[in-house]
Amino acid sequence: MEYRIEEHPEFTTVGHEICTTTCNGENLKTIPAFWRDVSTDGRLEDLETSAFDGKVYGICIADASSADEMSYAIAVREEGRNARIESEVAAGRLVRRSVPSATWAIFEAVGPVVESIQETWRRVFAEWFPSTNYEHADGPALEVYFTDQDPASPDHRCEVWIPIKTR
């Protein structure tokens, strides 16, 4: 698998979040359904207007108390404070998350988004981790989507970012 390793400083995101489980692949259904809901009800478009870097992040946050539970956020990077966003966070309609600085293994996923992103995740854990001297570091993993692309296109490109450390 092709990948690159990059260091990135901490940054803050704001967005919408759900809790899900990985039991029986439930997250493989609930996360795409969450994207559909956020895309069709206007919340994604609202977020994209605040996406100063042209990216929307899918943030995978493991629940420290359960190996099967996780949170997933659809968010944009926050740069400075915005009165509208502050009121949405205060009202509980948006969640603010900090993404810690990390060394990231970054993998490109190409193709219609649901199939390509799920296949990339599968291959990272089934093929890449076992064949490298890296392991998953603490912290959230990211899906990075570029707002100028059609998610149904066979040429769609997005990235999976996984925080890593040497074994």
Image: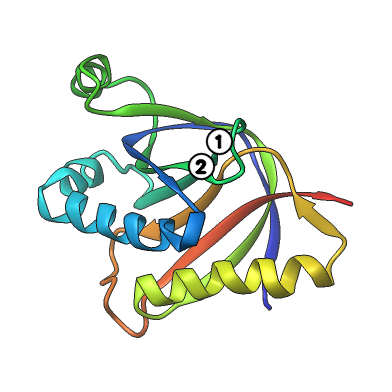
* Residue linked to disc 2: 69
Disc ID at residue 63: 1
Residue 4 percent coordinates (x, y): 69, 65
Q: Residue furthest front?
A: 24
Tell me which residue sits at (89%, 52%) in the image.
Answer: 167
Residues packed near mark 2 inside 10 Å, few (<14), some (14 to 19) or many (20 plus): some
Residue 54 percent coordinates (x, y): 34, 52
Sequence order check, earlier mark of 1 and 2: 1
Residue 144 percent coordinates (x, y): 45, 56
Residues packed near mark 1 inside 10 Å, few (<14), some (14 to 19) or many (20 plus): some
Say which element carries label 1: loop
On screen, residue 140 above or below 159: above
Q: Quadrant of residue 50?
A: top left
Label 1 with label 2: CB-CB less than 8 Å: yes
On screen, residue 87 above or below 156: above
Say which element carries label 2: strand
On screen, residue 21 above or below 145: above
Type of amino acid under label 2: Glu
